[in-house]
């Protein structure tokens, strides 16, 4: 299944699952396995299951890193109907014979492309092999053109039906995409504070993305103290990550600074602004980041801070999305960097013109050489070589001829 972020993929597979659970109530077995890439997404899916599956008396558990094996083994002994797990931890439980997947009838791979990007390919295939062949398998992703997705689909799916809700390579129309030119990291921090000062006039949460954990820490500590700010990255303990996300959801935290850990699957209400402190690495990563706002049709806004070394990347992402971002400026904080003097399109056109001109000149020269070789002019006839030794013999030859005549060997003139 291929769909944009915020379009309701989670409910698309949970509602049919709840329906099947109602039809098989009382079955003493693990019925469904849902694999997800991150602990945060596992908690989010579990929350929905608790909210809705409780009405049909179905139990769900999460199996992720950050928890003790004994605790998770105790959860499995209760024979839950729904297992929600990250691939790495579940594989460890299977290898230690703490988890049995032989009764799984409903297998879901949520955010499958993200799991592959995180290096879970072998773990996922190993877990799929532990499930029975007779099962229903659902693979969900915001992009199905991922090379790994195409390969793994052939291995685990039989005659699959593809459902595409929207084009993956398109900027969401309900999100305003903008860029702000910046000179360096210090300038970017000033711009973020200016944006937050403007944002304070409207209700809503802000999510700031950075590419590195150390930069997340730096941004958090250098933002103005007027905002309730916190951070989220993969090096934090799971309990701390859960606590921060709860604070963010309830509004106790207004601004969350995060790595791409927060770019997938997280559904938080009232996020109306996403700031890319560092530009996303690719068009797909950009789609997932900004997809934290403008969810379920709501209006959203995404601002990317672009330094000179990120210009080409930003242009590439715009071409990928087939759109053009609006350029902003902040009074008193305009960047010295104004973008390249010559656009990429113009430089390409100039280079093509130069190539054509060189080719034309080369052809003209070749034609001229061919013409002169085929019909040479009298002036261009080759000259005979004149050797010095031949010139030295000229006088001697004349003397020899005169002597021969005097000796009578040649006829004498009559007098």
Image (cartoon, rainbow, N blue to C red):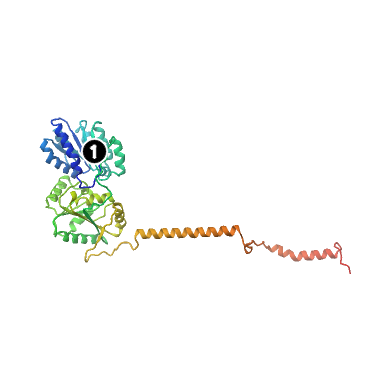
User: Picture coordinates of residue 244 (x, y %)?
Assistant: 15, 49
Quarter assignment of residue 85 = top left
State the image coordinates of residue 4 (x, y, percent, origin top left): 23, 47
- Quadrant where the N terminus sits is top left
Q: Element under label 1?
A: strand
Q: Which quadrant: the C terminus?
A: bottom right
Q: Residue at x 21, y 61 (%)?
A: 191
Which residue, given by chain and number where applicable, does mark 1 sit on?
Answer: 138
- Vertical relation: 191 (above or below) 6: below
Residue furthest to the bottom in view is 415
Across and down, in percent, residue 155 comes to 30, 36
Question: In the shown orientation, is residue 348 left or right of residue 261?
Answer: right
Q: Residue at x 40, y 60 (%)?
A: 350
- Name, please, the residue furthest toward the right: 415
Residue 95 seen anywhere in this rendered image of the structure: no
268 w.r.t. 156: above or below: below
12 shown above or below 379: above
- Pinpoint residue 409: horizontal percent, then vertical percent: 85, 61
């Amino acid at each position: 299944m291929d769909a944009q972020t915020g379009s309701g993929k989670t409910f698309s597979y949970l509602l049919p699952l709840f329906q099947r659970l109602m039809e098989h109530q009382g079955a003493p077995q693990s019925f469904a396995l849902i694999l997800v890439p991150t602990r945060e997404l596992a908690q989010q899916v579990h929350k929905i299951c608790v909210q809705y599956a409780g009405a049909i008396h179905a139990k769900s558990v999460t199996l992720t890193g950050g928890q003790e094996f004994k605790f998770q083994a105790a959860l499995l002994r209760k024979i839950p109907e729904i297992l929600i797990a990250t691939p790495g931890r579940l594989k460890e439980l299977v290898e230690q014979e703490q988890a049995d997947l032989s009764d799984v009838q409903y297998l879901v791979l949520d955010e499958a492309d993200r799991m592959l990007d995180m290096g879970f390919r072998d773990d996922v295939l190993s877990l799929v092999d532990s499930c029975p062949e007779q099962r229903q398998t659902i693979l969900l992703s915001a992009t199905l053109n991922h090379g790994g997705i195409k390969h793994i689909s052939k291995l685990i799916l039989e005659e699959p039906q593809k459902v595409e809700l929207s084009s993956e390579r398109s900027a969401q129309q309900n999100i305003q995409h903008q860029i702000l030119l910046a000179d360096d990291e210090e300038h970017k921090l000033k711009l973020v504070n200016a944006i937050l000062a403007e944002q304070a006039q409207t209700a809503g949460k802000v999510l700031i993305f950075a590419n590195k954990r150390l930069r997340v820490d730096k941004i958090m500590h250098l933002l103005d103290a007027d905002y309730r700010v916190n951070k989220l990255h993969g090096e934090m303990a799971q309990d701390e990550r859960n606590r921060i996300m709860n604070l963010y959801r309830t509004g106790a935290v207004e601004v969350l600074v995060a790595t791409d850990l927060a770019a997938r699957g997280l559904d938080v209400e009232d996020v109306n602004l996403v700031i890319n402190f560092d530009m996303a690495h690719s068009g797909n990563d950009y789609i997932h980041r900004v997809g934290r706002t403008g969810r379920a049709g709501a209006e959203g806004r995404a601002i990317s801070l672009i330094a000179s070394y990120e210009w080409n990347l930003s242009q590439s992402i715009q071409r990928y999305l087939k759109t053009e971002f609006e350029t902003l400026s902040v009074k008193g904080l305009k960047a010295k960097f104004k973008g390249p003097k010559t656009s990429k399109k113009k430089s390409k056109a100039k280079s093509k013109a130069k190539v054509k001109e060189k080719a034309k000149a080369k052809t003209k020269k070749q034609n001229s050489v061919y013409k002169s070789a085929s019909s040479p002019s009298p002036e261009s006839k080759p000259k005979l070589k004149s050797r010095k030794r031949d010139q030295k013999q000229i006088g001697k030859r004349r003397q020899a001829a005169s002597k021969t005549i005097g000796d009578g060997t040649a006829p004498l003139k009559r007098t």
